[in-house]
Each structure stands twice: as C-alpha cells, then as structure tokens.
Amino acid sequence: MTKIIYQIIAIFFILVFYGIYFIKMMLQKKKGIVTDQIAKGKTRDKDFYTELLMKIATILAPVAELISIIIGKSQLSFMLRIFGVYFAVVGVTVFGIAVYTMRDSWRAGVAEDDKEKRDLVTNGIYNYSRNPAFLGFDLVYIGILLMYFNPVLLAATLFAMIMLHLQILREEKFLESSFGKEYIDYKKRVSRYAGMGKITYVKIVMYIYFLIFIWSVLYFFTCLAYGGGFFLSWVWLWVLIAAFSFVRIKMLIARIGGTEKFKVPMVITWIYRIAATAFIVFFLITEAKIVDDMSAVPDKDLDYIILLGAGLNGTEPSNPYRVRIKRAGEYLSENEETIVIASGGQGEYEQISEAECAKRVLVRDYGIDESRIFLEEKSTDTHENLKFSLEIIGDPTARVGIVTNSFHEHRALAIAKKVGFENADPVPATTLLPVGIHYVVREFFGMVEFYLRDM
C-alpha cells in the first residue's frame, strides 16, 4: 500500500509541475506570445546545440522518472524518500511562483529574436533567486531521484541539471547584453540560484531560519500522516517553530533591506542573543545525551530487564510497544538467564493490561518461558513503571536493563536512578521513522520537565 501511495504522490508532482509549464505556454499562445524558443530559429552554433541538448535532457529526465516510478523500487532508505517528497514539494511551489511572477515575460529558451520588449523581472521570488524556475526544475529532479533512486535515473538527472546550468549561463549573457547595468546591479544583489547577494552574518541567520521554517511546515504534515494525525502529542510544536521562524525571517529581511519600521533596542537584542545561545547549547547537549543512549549496546546476562508499556490497540501492542517487545524478546532469547518484568497497567480504552499483552506476545512470538516473565500491572507512567518494578525485584543493586524506544532511553535511565536503581543500563528498541525525529526533539522537553521536578 505504501508503495502505491508514493507512486501516486510522485506522479502527482510530475503532473502538477509539467501542467504548470504547458498551461502557461497555452495561455501565452492565446495572447500571440511564442513561449517555447528552445533551439528554434537560431544559428547552428555552440549556443544552439547547448539549447538542443538541454531540450533532449529535459525530455529524457521525466521519461526516466516515470519508468522509475512505475518500477517502484528505490535503493535509498525510507527517510531519504521522505526528503525526496520535501524537495519535490518545494520545487513545484518555487516553479509555480516563478512562472506566475514572470507573467507574460516568461520564455523557455533565450528569446534572441523576440520582438516584444520585456521588462527585467526582479520582484517577488526574483528578489531571492535570479533563476527560480530553473531552481524549481532542479529541486523536483532531486526530489524524484531521492524517491526512486537508481543509476539510470541518477545519470538522467545529472545530465538535465548540468544542461540547465549551462542554459542559465547563456541566459545571463543575453540578459546582461539586453539590460546592461540594470542586470549587472541585479546580479550583485541576488544570487544565481538562491540568496541575497554577498554573504553577511545577518543573511546567514536568515537562511538558517528559512530552512527551519520549510522543514517545520513539511515535517508537521509528515507527523500528521505517520503519527496518528492531530492526536500525536506535541505535534503543534512544529507549527510554533514555523511561526517563530517566519517572524524572524520577516524581521531579518527588513533589516537587510533597511526597511525596519521599529528598531529593537540593543539591550533587548543582546538579551535575546544570550538567551538563544544558552538555549541552543542546552538543547544540543541534552539531545547529544539522548542520541548517545539511543545507540547504546546493552551488557550481556543482566539479572533483569524491565519492559516499559506503551499503549495497546485492543489486546494488541501499538507500533512503539511492538518494537519494545521485539527488542525484549531478542534480548531474552540471547540471554537465557535474564528475567523480564513486563510493566504497564490497563488504560481506559485497553482490554487487557500492557504487561499481560507483552507476556502473550513474548510467549507466542518469541518462545519465552512464562516462568521468566513477571508482571507489573499497576503503573500508569514511566516513574511508576520503574518504581513498582523495583518493588518486585527487591534489590536496588541488581543489574537491570531498561527496554524502551531508543528516544526515551535517556529519560527512563534518569528516572530509574531517581527511584533507586543503582545499576540500570539501556536496552534501546528501535525508534520508528519518520515520526521518530519528532519524538527525539519532544524528548528534550521531557528532560526539561524531569530536571524541574528534580530540583
């Protein structure tokens, strides 16, 4: 089913992208404007063959894309396919805005023989890219390549992108000869593909906020699609990050352009910078600790492992809980003397306790003997999971492993230490992507809450 969904998404991007292209051509044709001027009516010289090769490349690329989509196989990871969707979304959006902004000045190819006088378009998206339509092509090409990577598609994509770049160089010469100083000044102010001319500290900060904004918007919808919709806890965090980034982008653009309506006092600016720096440092240190425990290798022959509950669907484990049980089953199979404490009570909409569910799956799917499984069926959160499990074990010095999703491992170990465990080790289970990124970021705030409660 997932394969079909991604095929539909990829074909949709191609249809929308080329739909914009050909609809614009038809609309201009009705006005008597010849839009397609690629390798037409030109002297058979180097420039002509550059345009001709570009035309061939931009025909081969979508053909290779469609064949790759129909085959439906990719040699890249699932998360890279998600990034491919992101690139394609941004590419189609950029291309559509570029074509709309150009209005009747848009041409495909260098319009050397165009008798109509056209203005140099420098407004809207052209304030941030001299060639947004070409940028849109490249982003869509990269997106489909990431979604359906194979050597043939890679070659077709590189060929098309190289030819588009050579065409850009041709068009720059033409525009410079046509518009003179106006275009030269424009080149100094706006970068070829993306950017606002000469790099400065403020521009770098603005670019970072822009990337964060794009990521937050796209990842928000990814979380909705893969994380259970609006019921995913803290999903609105990405909306808040996007909104904050958007405000900062607007402020920084105004500062770069010298159009600030209100200048923030320097004292407030420095307070913000210090606070932001402190937050970023604290965030990165905390996330580094979380990630470190995510990849930990557990000791062998632990006395006990504690399997933390994570919600049920009726009598079956939720996806996060399923991977925890799988990890516990694997560890118990490899370490035959280890005892497991299956910890988790029965939630409001659950038909059995989480502990009972884990026991059933461990016995049924992993062949674990029931005598090695102890149940803790009163807990409602991680703190109670570990506190009540310690009461069952009765020995705070016992060598214990905490089985939970890897993003949650660092906080679980901190709580284990707080309730009295002296020798707790991580036994991390897989964190499922793409929503796993959300969990890892959200876990930072979970650690903040833990630190505040522990004060």
Image (cartoon, rainbow, N blue to C red):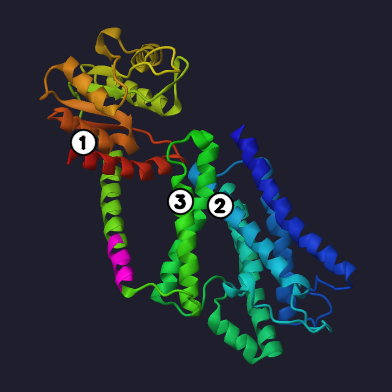
Q: Is 271 inside the magenta-drawn segment? A: yes
Measure the C-alpha gap from mark 1 to mark 2: 36 Å
**Residue for badge 3:** 240
Seen in the picture, residue 184 relative to 340 is either above or below; the reply is below
Q: Whole-percent x and y of residue 407? A: 34, 38
Measure the C-alpha gap from mark 3 to mark 1: 28 Å
Is 311 situated left or right of 253 in this image? left
**Residue for badge 2:** 86
To which quarter of the image does residue 380 belong?
top left
**Residue for badge 1:** 414
In percent of the image, x 62 and y 41: which residue is there? 6
Seen in the picture, residue 453 relative to 19 is either above or below; the reply is above
Q: Nearer the viewer, mark 3 or mark 2?
A: 3
181 or 370, which lies in front?
181
- Amino acid at circle 3: Leu
- Amino acid at circle 1: Ala
Is 370 situated left or right of 311 in this image? left
Seen in the picture, residue 455 relative to 429 is either above or below; the reply is below
- Amino acid at circle 2: Tyr
Quadrant of the image for the C terminus?
Answer: top left
171 or 158, which lies in front?
171
To which quarter of the image does residue 349 belong?
top left
First to last magenta residue range: 267-275
Label 2 neighbour load within 10 Å: few <14, some 14-19, many 20+: many
Q: Earlier in the sequence, mark 3 or mark 2?
A: 2
Seen in the picture, residue 53 relative to 330 is either above or below; the reply is below
